[in-house]
Image (cartoon, grey):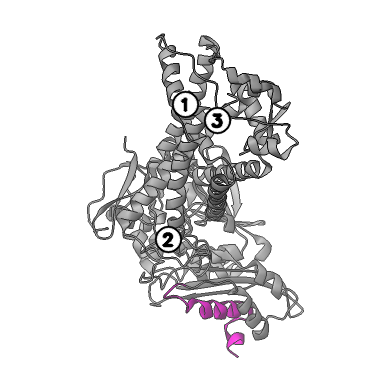
Amino acid sequence: MAVIRDVMPAFDLLQPSSAAEAQQLLEQNGADAWVMAGGLDSFDWLKDRIKKPQVLVDLSGVDELRGIRMSGAGVEIGAMTTLTEIANHDEIKKNYGVLSDAVSMVASPQIRNQGTLGGNVSQDVRCWYYRGGWPCYRAGGNICYADTPVGRNREHAIFGANRCVAVHPSDSVPALIALDAKFVVQTAKGERVVDAEDYFVGPEDDITKINMLQPGDLLTAIRIPSTWSGAKFYFEKVRDRNVWDFPLMNVASAIKLSGGNIDQARIAVNAVSPRPMRLKAVEDAVLGKPANAETGEMAGRLAVQGAVPLQFNAYKIPLMRNLVKRAIAGGQEAAA
Amino acid sequence: MSFLQWATSPWGQSVPTHIAWSLIWIAVIFGFCFMVVHSLYLIIVKPPKRFAERKAEAAAAGVPDRVPRHTLTARMFHWVMAASMITLLITAFLPKVGIQFNWVVYHWIAGLVLTASILFHVVHSTFFLDFWSIWPDRTDLTDAKNRTLRFFGKDAPLPSKFAKYPLENKLYHGSVMLAGLAVIGTGLFMMKRVETGIFVRNPYLFSDMTWGWMYVLHGLAGVGFIGLTLVHIYMGLRPEKLPITKSMIFGWMSRDFYLEEHDTERWAVKGAPETKRGLAASDGD
C-alpha cells in the first residue's frame, strides 16, 4: 500500500550533457536506470517510493533534445521541448493546430512549462491501484484491482483490456497519431524510427510496459511530416475539471477534403484503451463521404463497436460515439 | 536467492504472487545437465544390457514381426497432449524471458486442450487398455533394487527384462501425472481471473493468499514441466530408444527389439499383428 513520503529512495543521479552520453548511461545501467524528462511523472513514483531505481538519468541538461526545427519535410520536435513551447509555436499553431490544441489542454500552465513532449507521450498509466503501489498485473502481481465488481474503474478502458484495464492518459498522443508522427528512438544499435501508434505497447503483449522502449533506449525526437500540414483538424478533451485534469477521453482528427468530401482522414482517441487507439476502420469508412453530422453519426457508431464497459464506465461508450462524430463533422456541424 | 515473489496485499498481508522466474533457467539447466551427464555415462561407462534368461522366451516363436504397442487412439492422445504441452510451455515462459506476444488466449486454450486430452486418457486407459501396465509392480521394484546393487558392484541377481514399460517410463508417467494434475487443477481456477467467455470472471473466488499459493503451485509444476519435457525429448531421440519413439508414431516395434528388451510373460504378445487378438493382447496403449 502506498504511503506518500517526502523523502525519495536513494539513487545515483546522472546528468548527461548530450543525447549520446545519455543513451550510453542508459545502456550501461540497463533496467536499473530511470529516465527523467520534466520529472512530473517521475517524482510521483519516486516520492511514493513505488519505483526505486538505482540510477536516475536526468535529461534536463541535454540541450540538443530541446527545440522545434522546421524543414520542408515537416517539423522535428525534440523530446525535451516543453509543452508550453509547442503550444505557443507559431508554425505549429498555423500548420499543425491539432497538436498545439492538444498540448495546451494538458494539465495546468505550470505543468506545461515544466512538462515535455517526450515525457507526456511516455508517461505511465493513471490507474489508482497501480499508482497506489498495489501488486496488480501491471506491477508484476496476479490481479487487476480495478476490474473487480467493486473496483473503481470509472476512468478505465472500454477497449483493449487484457487483464489490465488502465488507460493511456496522454493528450498529445492522439494529435501526434492524427498527424502521422514518427518517434525517433536512440538504441544501442542505432537510431530507430517508429510510427506514433507503434510506440505504444498493450497489456496483451507486455503487461508491465506502456511503450516499446527497452532498457538503454532513449526517445530523442518526434517528427511530424508535412503531409497533413494545413489539413482540417479537430481536438477535444473531456475531463472532470476543465481547469486541470487528465482526460476521461480525448479525440484528434486530421481530415483532407476534396470537393466537400473526405479525401483522407486520420482519427485517434485516447483514455479508452491501455494504448492510444487509431480508428482505422472509421478512417476507411468515412472516405468519399461529406464531413457532416450524418457521416459523423455513422463514424461514431462504428467507432464504439466492440466496446466492453466495466462496472462504472459505460458512459464512455456514448461519450466516444459523440467525440468521434464531432471529430468528423466538427463541433458546430455535429451539434446542428 | 528467493524461490517465490511476495507482495503486500491491500490489507497489509504479505502474500506470494508467483514463483521467482529465475526458476525457469534452473529447470532448463537441470534438463541440459541431465542430458550431458546421462550421455557421458553411456559413453564412458558403457553399461552392458544384461537381463536374466527366462524359459518363457520360448514363447517368442509366436511373436509377429511387428509387435503392436500403441493404438492409433493412444498415439493421437500422446501427440495432442504433446502439442498442447509445448504450446503451454511456449506461451507461459517465452514472455517471461523477454519474448513478448499476446500469450494469454493461446495459453488457456492449450490448457483446455490438455485438460480434455487428459480426461480422455483417464477414461481410455482405465476402461479400454491395461490400466496397471503403467504402474510399477513388485518385479519393477525388485529389479530396481538389484540394478542399483549391481551398479555399486554388489552381488545381486540379474534384473528381469521389462514389462511393456520400463520402470523409468512408469516413474516419468507418475511425475507427469502429478505435475499435470497440479497445472490443470490450478489452471482451471486461474481461468476465473481472466476473460475467457467461458466462465464469469470472479477474482474474489479465493483470498489473496490462496490465489497466491495457487499461482506458485501452477508455476512450480510449470517449470517442472520444462525439465520433464527436455528429458522426455532427449530420451525419445536417443538411438537406443528410437524404436520406442517410432512405435509412438507408427504403432509397432520390431520383433527383435521386443524380444531383446521385453519379457514375453510380463508383456505378452499373442498372434500376428493383423489379427484382432494379437492387438488386444498387446494392449496397444
Labels 3, 2: one chain: no
Residue position marked by numbered label 3 in the rendering: B165
Alpha carbons under labels 3 and 1: distance apart: 10 Å
Give residue A80's position: percent from left, percent from top.
Answer: 46, 53
Mark 1 chain: B
Give the crowd class for mark 2: few <14, some 14-19, many >=20 residues within 10 Å. Answer: many
> Vertically, is A66 above or below B22?
below
Alpha carbons under labels 3 and 2: distance apart: 56 Å
Residue bounds of the magenta highlight: A310-336
- Please tell me whether the stretch drawn in magenta is mainly helix, strand or loop: helix
| Amino acid found under the numbered disc labelled 2 | Val
Q: Nearer the viewer, residue A211 or B9?
A: B9
Numbered badge on residue A39: none
Residue position marked by numbered label 2 in the rendering: A125
Alpha carbons under labels 2 and 1: distance apart: 60 Å
Task: Name which residue lies at 49% across and 43% down.
Answer: B93
| Amino acid found under the numbered disc labelled 3 | Tyr
Q: Is residue A16 visible?
A: no
Give residue A329's position: percent from left, percent from top.
Answer: 63, 81
**Residue B152: quadrant of the picture:** top left
> Vertically, is B191 above or below B228?
below
Residue position marked by numbered label 1 in the rendering: B140
Task: Name which residue lies at 61% across and 78% down.
Answer: A300
Q: Secondary structure at mark 2?
A: loop
Mark 3 or mark 2, whichever is nearer to me: 3
Q: Quadrant of the N terminus of chain A?
A: bottom left
Mark 2 chain: A
